[in-house]
Image (cartoon, helix red, strand yellow):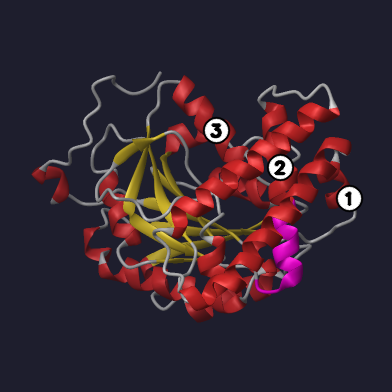
Amino acid sequence: MGNSSKLSTKITCENIGSKFSSFSIIIEWENFVQSDARHASLMLQNLSKQINQISKKFSSKSEIIVVFNPKDVDSVLVKKFVEDNFSFLPLVDFKFIPGFGLHYYELKNLGVKHSSNDLIIFFDSDVTPEDGWLEEMLQSFQNPDIKVVGGTTHMPNDSIMGKALALVWFTPRKSKYNKLFEVDHFYANNVAFRRKVCQSHPFPQINQFHGQCNIVADKLRKSGFKIFSQPKSRIIHDVPQNAKDFVSWALTMGLDYVAIRRLRNVTWSSGLEQYKFKNSTVRQLISRSRQRLHYSSLKSKDYPAATFIVLSYFIIMGIGMMISFVRPNYYSYIRKNNWKMWT
């Protein structure tokens, strides 16, 4: 099972002129609870506009599946919010699926079970698609050999917070490519699968906030599937709205950074090895930040505030790494106490 070793990513003229396959967009609603509702409103408006712009290219009616945890948000309110902000309701079918007690990746898996189309697109409730996002994503699958395509995600560039976090965040800066290229990973807030591939590679249930994408990507590549990135399918990710969100975000990054490597059988037999690991990790992150600074839009007057934000991130992330060393079961403890973490 897998892709041909001579996979061609070139889209033929015949493919370009053909109809798009029907799709199922799965939107988790957990992040909505933790972010500013204005972002979800803008997301729905932009998505609605894009669907309307290319609706004549659809081979059949597609669907949008909103999956949510009723413990966090009322189902009636979810439905009303979506319908109030999605301008072209008749163009797609909507499904509102409750997932009692489920969280981010579990909600995505639930959405897949209720989907019915050939293409499955994962999207988040706190991101905003840029113009052309959907069409470029669908165009990628005009080549029948393409099975998995991830878009690109970046922080907003209209605030010092966004500019500063772009220096340290796990997503890369704007790609130099303008067409599909092969990668070894993807992000769950902006990725599309062929249905059968998605069903056979669900997000694993592990006690972490992050890292599930890495596991799925590893399994895909071991099974012979190639993962591609579509740099024209760009989305903007929300930034932490307050100090509490910032702290929880940086903390979970540190907690999971250690846990992910523990899953990959990286062990630290002594406190000295733990120290070396944390020290080298921080050095790598600082090096990445310095490289990205060259391409950032930060002005000299922004450096003091940006430096404070970046250093705070490193310190809090380091604390998270230390906690993960001494308390590997942190995830279960946080969920048991129903702490809301901005991730």
* Visible residue check, residue 40: no
Q: Magenta span covers which residues?
A: 241-251
Q: Residue furthest left?
A: 13
- Depth order, front residue of 163/154: 163
Q: CA distance from mark 2 to mark 1?
A: 17 Å
**Image check: 6 left or right of 134?**
left
Q: Which mark is residue 256?
A: 2
On the image, the x and y values in percent for residue 12 come to 12, 41
- What secondary structure is found at the residue carrying circle 2? helix
Q: Is residue 74 among what the camera can see?
A: yes
Q: Nearer the viewer, residue 267 or 245?
A: 267
The amino acid pointed to by label 2 is Asp
Judging by the rendered image, the residue that carries numbered circle 1 is: 336
**Residue 58 in the image: x percent, y percent?**
27, 57
In magenta stretch: residue 246: yes
Figure quadrant of the C terminus: bottom right
Question: Type of residue at label 1?
Answer: Lys
Using the image, determine if residue 335 lies above or below residue 206: below
